[in-house]
Amino acid sequence: MSQFNRKRARQRIHRRIRKKVGGTTTRPRLAVHISNRYVYAQVIDDAAGKTLAAASSRETEVKSKSTNVDTAAKVGALIAKRSKAAEISEVVFDRGGHIFHGRIKALADGAREGGLKF
């Protein structure tokens, strides 16, 4: 009997999502990655293959000892601010195979409050 591997299942879901979700020049992709320690967010133009804006919880403006919902919300607000500086107002949200709950939801809400439209 095979055992359930949570990481492999998330990667499979992420590949399935990426078949449908892609960033364009007019509407780039907001990609989220969450490790055990940090939260990362990037605004990516997949057509050109370039990162337009990025933010993470490793930066001094957001830095915290733990990766929690408050930290994720701060990263969302920071990515929204940097996206506005790069003249980006609409994005496609790529949750990276994670469930839209907890830190992922907090990051999305922080970005929405910062002015990004999903």
Image (cartoon, grey):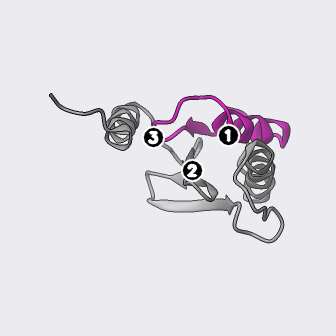
Identify which residue, 66 or 21, lies in the foreground: 66
Helix, strand or loop at mark 2? strand
Residue at 77% of width from left, 34% of height from top?
Answer: 109
Pointer 1 residue: 103
In this picture, which residue range is highlighted in magenta? 91-118
Cβ atoms at labels 2 and 1 below 8 Å apart: yes
Q: Quadrant of residue 29?
A: top right
* Residue occupying image coordinates x 79% and y 41%: 110
Tell me which numbered mark, 2 or 1, is placed earlier along the sequence. 2
* Label 1: how many Cα within 10 Å (few below 14, some 14–19, many 20+): many
> Relative to residue 111, is residue 37 drawn left or right?
left
Residue 66 located left or right of residue 7: right
Label 3 crowd (10 A; few <14 / some 14-19 / many >=20)? many
Q: Say which label, 3 or 2, has the lower sequence index.
A: 3
Q: How many marks?
A: 3
Which of the two discs, 1 and 3, sits closer to the camera? 1
Q: Are marks 3 and 2 in contact (CB under 8 Å)?
A: no
For label 2, the residue is 34
Residue at coordinates 84% horizontally, 43% vertically from top-left? 114
Give the class, few, some or many, for how many residues have Cα within 10 Å of label 2's Cα (few <14, many ≥20). Answer: some
Q: Is residue 85 visible?
A: yes
Which tag, 1 or 3, sits closer to the chain's start?
A: 3
